[in-house]
């Protein structure tokens, strides 16, 4: 699990391009949450004619991005950071089974709430959420698969990353994105350069992302990512193997 910074670190992350050191993954941490709920097996819930729950996307009132049946009886929420390698691992390990076995059944929905661990996560999230809502989670999944290349790019462009902190706020996240190759990554996946630049210059949304992270961190005592809620209860689990067991205990079987 990648450790989360303090409230002051969130502000620092928004104001500076400190990121390379902060973005390094921390050690795995144990959760402190309630035991996962348990229940009888739940029957599959058919999607509307001609639809597949795994291709159904919506935005939640909390600002998360949901895949699946909005009224699923088993609701999995993931607080995830695009710079977090443990989140990338979870995305890779859960990909097929979570989608095809759990979400497609209509029993389970997955809601991702983006968490700002550091200054890398702000431009990455601004770009991932720059298109239509239904594109956000697929783009995030692709970004996690590409994440190692971002760190390689940042190591090669460390001077540009550091100099980004001297730029005005409306230029800062664009400079960080360019240093990491994020701009080219998203441009190759349908986020046009002008569109991406406009999203990266949206300092009001950047502030909202950091404020939402601060609020969630305090509300749920989030000390790192990924962190999961299952039907509102924080799970003592941060790997697909453990989350899968929790879903099955909750009735997704």
Image (cartoon, grey):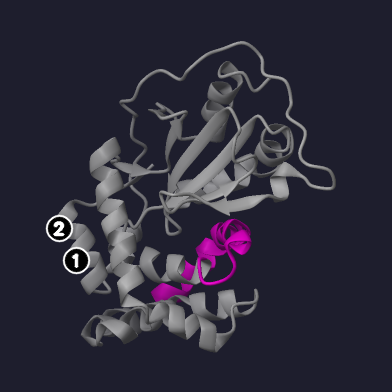
Magenta stretch, residue numbers: 129-155
Q: CA distance from mark 2 to mark 1?
A: 6 Å
Inspect this view and state whether residue 147 appears: yes
Percent coordinates x, y for residue 25 in the rendering? 37, 51
Q: Residue at x 23, y 52 (%)?
A: 5
- Residue farthest top in this picture: 40
Callout 1 secondary element: helix
Which numbered dot is residue 8?
2
Percent coordinates x, y for residue 191 in the rendering? 59, 78
Q: Is residue 47 left or right of residue 28?
A: right
Vertical placement of residue 180 versus 79, above or below: below
If the image is split into quadrants, where does the C terminus sit? top right
Q: Residues at badges 2 and 1 in contact (C-beta under 8 Å)?
A: yes
The residue that mark 1 highlights is 12
Callout 2 secondary element: helix
- The part of the image, by quadrant, that contains residue 245 is top right
Instruction: Reply yes or no: does residue 140 show up in magenta.
Output: yes
């Amino acid at each position: 699990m990648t450790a989360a910074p303090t409230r002051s670190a969130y502000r620092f992350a928004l104001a500076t391009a400190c990121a390379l050191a902060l973005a390094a993954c921390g050690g795995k941490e144990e959760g402190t949450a309630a035991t996962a709920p348990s229940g009888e097996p739940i029957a599959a819930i058919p999607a509307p004619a001609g639809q597949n729950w795994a291709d159904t996307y919506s935005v939640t009132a909390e600002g998360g991005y949901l895949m699946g049946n909005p009224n699923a009886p088993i609701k999995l929420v993931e607080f995830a950071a695009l710079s977090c390698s443990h989140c990338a691992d979870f995305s890779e390990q859960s990909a097929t089974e979570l989608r095809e076995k759990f979400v497609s059944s209509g029993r389970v929905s997955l809601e991702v709430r983006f968490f700002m661990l550091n200054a890398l996560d702000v431009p990455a999230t601004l770009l991932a959420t720059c298109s239509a809502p239904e594109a956000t989670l697929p783009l995030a999944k692709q970004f996690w698969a590409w994440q190692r290349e971002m760190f390689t790019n940042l190591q090669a462009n460390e001077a540009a990353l550091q100099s980004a902190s001297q730029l005005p706020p409306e230029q800062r996240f664009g400079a960080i994105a360019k240093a990491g190759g994020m701009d080219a990554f998203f441009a190759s996946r349908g986020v046009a350069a002008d569109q991406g630049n406009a999203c990266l210059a949206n300092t009001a949304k950047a502030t909202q992302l950091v404020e939402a992270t601060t609020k969630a961190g305090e509300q749920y005592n989030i000390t790192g990512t990924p962190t999961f809620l299952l039907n509102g209860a924080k799970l003592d689990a941060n790997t697909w193997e453990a989350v899968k067991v929790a879903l099955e205990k909750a009735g997704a079987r």
